[in-house]
Amino acid sequence: MTGSTSSPPPTAIRCVGVEVQYTVRSHRLLLRDLLRGNSPKATIVNAIRGVDLEIQVGESVGVVGPNGSGKTTLLQAMTGVLPLASGQLMVRSLPTFLGVKAALRPRSTGRSNIRIGLLAQGLRWGEVEAMVNEVAAFTDLGSAIDRPMETYSSGMRARLHFAIATALTPDILLIDEALAVGDRAFRERSAHRLDEHRASAGTVLLVSHNLAEVRRSCERTIWLQEGRIMADGPTEEVLRDYESS
């Protein structure tokens, strides 16, 4: 009698030969070029180069690499914000992107942004109203929650967006340096909330220069360099090679 074998977890994200390019135009022209009607010179930047990657449901994966290595570009491609030059990128569901520079409505109060964010995640008005105070409390912004967001510091905005994006458990959560803000207590609460998402089989990709946070949160890590994957494996092994490079 043959013993039963468990099937592997389903795939959350799959990249096959993914290439992402963007164009940079120089704004510096000589006077003679302007008089001749010449256009600014365009340079094609190959930000992501032939990335093959598969991430399973429930995995927490760190993404490390120096500035300009393509980490944020890869996450933005996964959300559909950036088009692919070639290759295939498949996701199980639309990822939630959480970054320090993520856009909210600056002239609206923090509390209004919470309502808008929860409605955008598909909740009905009554459900939103039942959650607003809980989400506001998580931000730990105090009375500032009722001030326009344009008065917030970058750290305050990041805390607000983290609270909104993680109020529900997204199937796929992409985090771009958003845990590097706030005081120690807020960072600990954020890490605990991510632990809860992972326990609910949520998939998390964490881009961070804070290698201690990657070690704490991720069993698997990807090292990107100049748009290519240099290493992909157990976090401690990959970070050891990355730190010694």
Image: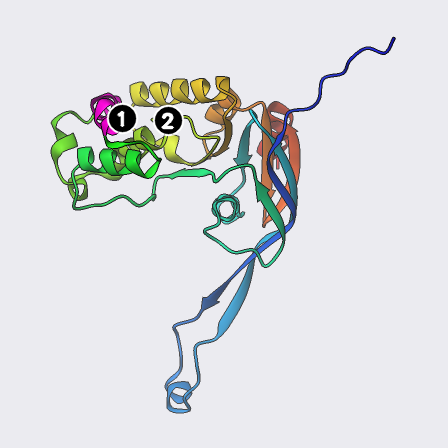
Identity of the amino acid at label 1?
Glu
Which structural element holds mark 2? loop
Viewer-proximal residue among 56 and 191: 56
| Of marks 1 and 2, the one in the foreground | 1
- Name the residue at the top extreme: 1
The image position of residue 54, as x and y in percent, is 64, 36
Instruction: Magenta stretch: give its range.
Output: 126-140
Q: Residue at x 42, y 86 (%)?
A: 33
Magenta stretch, main secondary structure, is helix
Q: Is residue 22 visible?
A: yes
* Quarter of the figure with residue 98: top left
Q: Is residue 244 visible?
A: no
Identity of the amino acid at label 2?
Leu
The image position of residue 30, as x and y in percent, is 40, 82
Residue for badge 1: 127
Residues packed near mark 2 inside 10 Å, few (<14), some (14 to 19) or many (20 plus) = few
Q: Residue at x 81, y 10 (%)?
A: 3
Residue for badge 2: 168
Q: Which mark is residue 179?
A: none
